[in-house]
Amino acid sequence: MTEATDAAPYLSVRNLVVEFPTEDGIVRAVDGINFDLNRGQTMAIVGESGSGKSVTSQAILGLINRKAASISGEVLLDGVDLVAESDDALRALRGREMAMIFQDPLSSLHPFYKIGKQLVEAIRVHQDMSKADARKQAIEMLEKVGIPSADRRIDDYPHQLSGGMRQRVMIGMALVNSPNLLIADEPTTALDVTVQAQILDLVKTLQQEFETALIVITHDLGVVAEVADDIAVMYGGRIVEKGTIDEVYYRPEMPYTLGLLASMPRMDQPRTTRLDPIPGQPPSLINLPAGCVFRPRCPYSDEVPDNGCLEVRPRLLPTTPGHDVRCHLPVERRREIAAERLGAVTNAGEAR
Amino acid sequence: MLFALVIVTFLMFAILPADPAALTCGKNCTPERIEQSRQRLGLDEPLMSQLGRFVIGIPCGRYYPADGPVLTCPALSSTDKAVNGQFYCAVPCLGYSFRTGEDVTTLIVQAMPVTISVAIGAFILFLVTGVLLGIFAALRRGRWQDRTAMGAALVGYSFPSFFIGLVLLYLVVILPPKLFNGWQLLPFPAYEPLRTNPTAWFQTLILPSITLALLYAAFYARLTRNQMLETLGEDYIRTARSKGLPERTVIFRHGLRAGLTPIVTAAGLDFAFLLGGAVIVEQIFALPGLGRMTVDAVDDLDLQLILGTVLVTSVFVLIANLIVDILYAVIDPRVRLT
């Protein structure tokens, strides 16, 4: 989105909609998402649980059972529309062209197989290679993700490794076929704070080495500032604010993004400052109302005349180049609110 | 464990108002002859020493009628059938049947091959069909294939084996000759040992194995289905898919493997119970197996034979438990020590 000018972007998501029919009605988990991503670039998708960020990523990878959900729109990976592809074609791309790291490495690695076997399996699905060669490659990969004495550790079971090591194995397994797109679904949430930074560094380093397009899904805005070039903030299955890290993180406009930032503990504020949570609950995704999805939790919705927030669905419109916001409030008023609530944030941003 | 079982069985007989010695001596019984056989079988001794002799007899063999102290190994090396007018019962001695006067060990050894054959046949059948059906149903969850399979399983599970057995017997053995002018699909079951007549052996075992298997297969189909549904929702299955593994590998190597533990547990114990004899099925198909022998023994209040079969059955259950525990470690590396 930042430099999607000349060549077509590597990944381009257009009007992606994912719906799950349930007994209570149709759940529209992802509702018309658009974004572009180039190789070597990092995009962060931020939002609460249930905002549709994980479903988006799984839809891109084709991990959503299409018999249980209806997916429409386009996911163009290097010009190929993944939504239209067959299951077999998607399977052939998974692991080789695009790969994923999951939240909890303990439950995401198979508990009954040695990590070496799981890596070798991942290699040999996509590369015609003898077991011995694949094993060599697996050891190299484990060394690359920073596992000490990898030639011995390769015969360990997942439960014999620490959480950080397990996530390193997951990263190694995802990157073992040098995919061009890597999706990290909350890669540090299940880890100790001390390990989180290491894992993020590792992902960043490897991303640069392999020149991967990286999507980081998270609810941790600290992670975002660390790794991302672009941010998309999701709420109720839609992107509500999107832009470069400088724009969205340091000059946020959408009240939901403000709420997220205000509810985050910060090192640069006195410890007596109270955290400021967003009141209310995320919306149910069944039969969404006509207006703004965030309205019931938005403290400023009555400032918009004629019940605008209640009746008209706001569109995602640019405020400055490379910064789109979905909100009815006038731009000046949004910036005023942002300054009010996040004075410290903006200052900190400018200090950097 | 085994010892406790033996004691309990022994005590139950001590309470029963029956005199084994009277059972032994047959029709023309006189008080003298009862007394005689009572002595011969050691039934005149106190209960505790009877128990002692029985237990010692298993590893050491024993003499009838007994003399000397209870807790010595009488004759480990002796192979003579009779010494000084005593009968020698060879290791492992489980005593003599009160009813037929035969050696219990020999009776059990004769009945075992029948039971083992049926057990293995049924075991293979129910495990393969049950597990495959369960996987199939899990993959078609909520659709008509799933409902049909689970409905069939419920029916199979609900019908008693004597019903299924008799229906099968009628459909397969009795009906075809009537319909097709004497042409036989299967002859009427009459057990023959594998060594003397393999064809007849196989033919007689088909129906009992199927009857037993139907009941168990239904259970395993349900168990496997639930297990598969549980494991297929796990994170590592999603990982396997994200690696681009073929669906078959995902389901069998990643899904089934993870859901195998409870299936193995149940299968091990069920196999042990099958080895203890399938009473009803053996009765229907006239198989001279352990189950039938046990029932007859209970009918006849034949303490020695009951003790023997109880002991053998519980040994199977214990061994099966041990094997299941070992298999746990093979399947799940987290169970292994070190």
Image (tube, grey):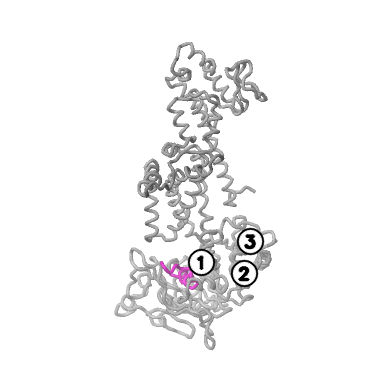
The reply to whether residue A197 is visible in this rendering is no
Q: State the residue position of label 2.
A: A176
Residue B191 point in image, percent of width and height: 48, 38
Q: State the residue position of label 3.
A: A116
Mark 1 and mark 2: Cα distance apart in space: 36 Å
Q: Which of marks 1 and 3 is in front?
A: 3
Residue A275 point in image, percent of width and height: 47, 66
The reply to whether residue B197 is visible in this rendering is yes
Tell me which label, 1 or 2, sits earlier in the chain.
2
A240 relative position to A90: left or right: left
Mark 3 and mark 2: Cα distance apart in space: 12 Å
* Three-letter amino acid code at the position of disc 1: Pro
* Magenta region, residue range: A52-67
Residues indicated by labels 1 and 3 sit on the same polypeptide chain: yes
Question: Which chain letter goes with mark 2?
Answer: A
Closest to the observer: B209 or B246? B209
Mark 1 and mark 3: Cα distance apart in space: 39 Å
Q: State the residue position of label 1.
A: A265
Tell me which label, 1 or 3, sits earlier in the chain.
3
Instruction: Mark 3 and mark 2 in contact? Answer it, CB < 8 Å.
Output: no
Instruction: Mark 1 and mark 2 in contact? Answer it, CB < 8 Å.
Output: no
**Image-quadrant location for residue B90:** top right
